[in-house]
Image (cartoon, grey):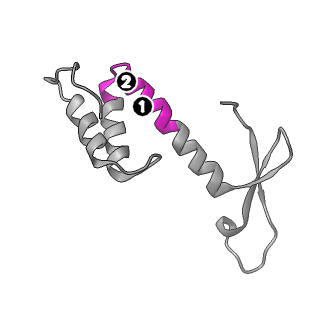
Amino acid sequence: MPLLRYHVMMAPTSSSTATDTSELIDTDSGKRVRLKIVVENCVKRWFEEYLHAAQEGDHEMMLLVGAMYNTGYGVQKDPAKGKYWLDRARPNHQSHKNQP
């Protein structure tokens, strides 16, 4: 996945808040992208990185991935997968269980 660099630009306004009008510019292409979309993409990318670390055995990341699945933060909400990762993070867990 290519790393995109952004510069924050505020559109001039007299009545709107800055968060309503914030835009970002992709410095590679000059395309304007809404801040909300950039943040959503970052959160999804974080989830993917945390999931990879959890799959490699990082217990802290297992807890984080479980919480992200339970809340739907960065990934579609899935309580069964959340429980799987939270259970797997327990110190006495047997790692040979199948992933949902």
Indicate the quadrant containing the N terminus: top left, top right, bottom left or bottom right: top right
**What's the CA distance linking mark 2 and mark 1?**
6 Å
Residue at (44% x, 31% y) in the render: 50
Indicate the quadrant containing the C terminus: top left, top right, bottom left or bottom right: top left
Up/down of 39 relative to 53, above or below:
below
Residue behind mark 2 = 55
Closer to us: 24 or 74: 74
Instruction: Locate residue 93, reporting x and y percent.
Output: 16, 24
Residue behind mark 1 = 51
Horizontal side of residue 48 vs 68, given as left or right: right
Q: Amino acid at mark 2?
A: Gln
Horizontal side of residue 39 vs 5, given as left or right: left
Residue at (77% x, 79% y) in the render: 14
Q: Amino acid at mark 1?
A: Leu
* Label pair 2/1, CB-CB below 8 angstroms: yes
Residue 100 magenta-highlighted: no
Residue at the bottom extreme of this rendering: 15
Residue at (60% x, 45% y) in the render: 41
* Quarter occupied by residue 56: top left
Q: Which residues are magenta?
A: 46-60
Mark 2 closeness class: few <14, some 14–19, many ≥20 residues within 10 Å: some
Mark 1 closeness class: few <14, some 14–19, many ≥20 residues within 10 Å: many
